[in-house]
Image: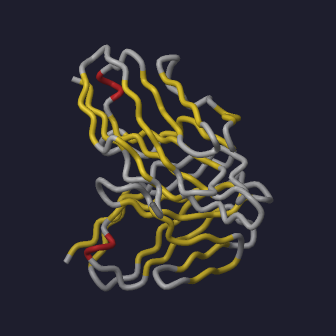
Amino acid sequence: GAGVSQSPSNKVTEKGKDVELRCDPISGHTALYWYRQRLGQGLEFLIYFQGNSAPDKSGLPSDRFSAERTGESVSTLTIQRTQQEDSAVYLCASSFGGQGATGELFFGEGSRLTVL
Amino acid sequence: LAKTTQPISMDSYEGQEVNITCSHNNIATNDYITWYQQFPSQGPRFIIQGYKTKVTNEVASLFIPADRKSSTLSLPRVSLSDTAVYYCLVGPMDSSYKLIFGSGTRLLVRP
């Protein structure tokens, strides 16, 4: 597709279960970002990738959170042993980081996670 | 890491001009200033970007003083559909850095 695609759009899970959230960035975009947005709050930085490498993982809230990116394309954010405080919208954005880059972030529609 | 500060909320009426100011006192030489707009249940979207002086596009203007320690997003003649959260973001263009969003400004446009 032409934009950033995220799946699932909605996920309801039970406390203690693991979840995987997927992000398909715009083709050719080398940079990929994950943010968390709790209800009525701003965007909380989680992690970003430059290619397949994650230079900065400092935003990941705990060791239950991990992310990977393969083929300079799809990224997966995994939350293990989910807790109720993990309930939020998880937003993915991509950006063209090569020559001529503008730094503009293109966001997906987000994955809404509800932990019961 | 350039931290940004914005007003939490603003109210306006249809047809008025709205100016939202963002402070970024420790902006770096290679940082640009970008503004995003977010509607409920959607991801943020790009509005405008600038480095210095003034930039104008079809939806907004961006004013940046010479010291670049602040910037002002100007929305001319707002309508109800401009009700949204507006974020100021400071960072380099080459996506080589984590990009931290501030808390944003919640704009409410009244009839």
Position above or below: A65 against B12? above
Residue A37 location (% of width, % of height)? 39, 41
| Side (left or right) of A64 relative to B98 | left
For this view, does A29 lie left or right of residue B102? right
Q: From the top left corner, tell me how far across and down residue B33 is, in percent.
A: 63, 63
- Residue A13 lies, in percent from the top left, at 25, 25
Q: Toward which corner of the image does residue B23 lie, by quadrant?
A: bottom right
Image height check: is A87 above or below B73?
Answer: above
The N terminus of chain B - image quarter: top right
Furthest toward the right, the residue is B29
Total numbered labels placed on residues in the image:
0
**Quadrant assignment, res A36:** top left
- The answer to whether B107 is drawn above or below residue A36 in the figure is below
Residue A96 in the figure: left or right of residue B5: right
What's the residue at 78%, 59% (across, down)?
B30
Foreground residue among A113 and B56: A113
Name the image quarter holding the C terminus of chain B: bottom left
**Point 46% across, 60% down: residue:** A3
The location of residue A64, given as percent across then percent down, is 47, 18
- Image height of B90 relative to A72, above or below: below
At 60% from the left and 67% from the top, the residue drawn is B71
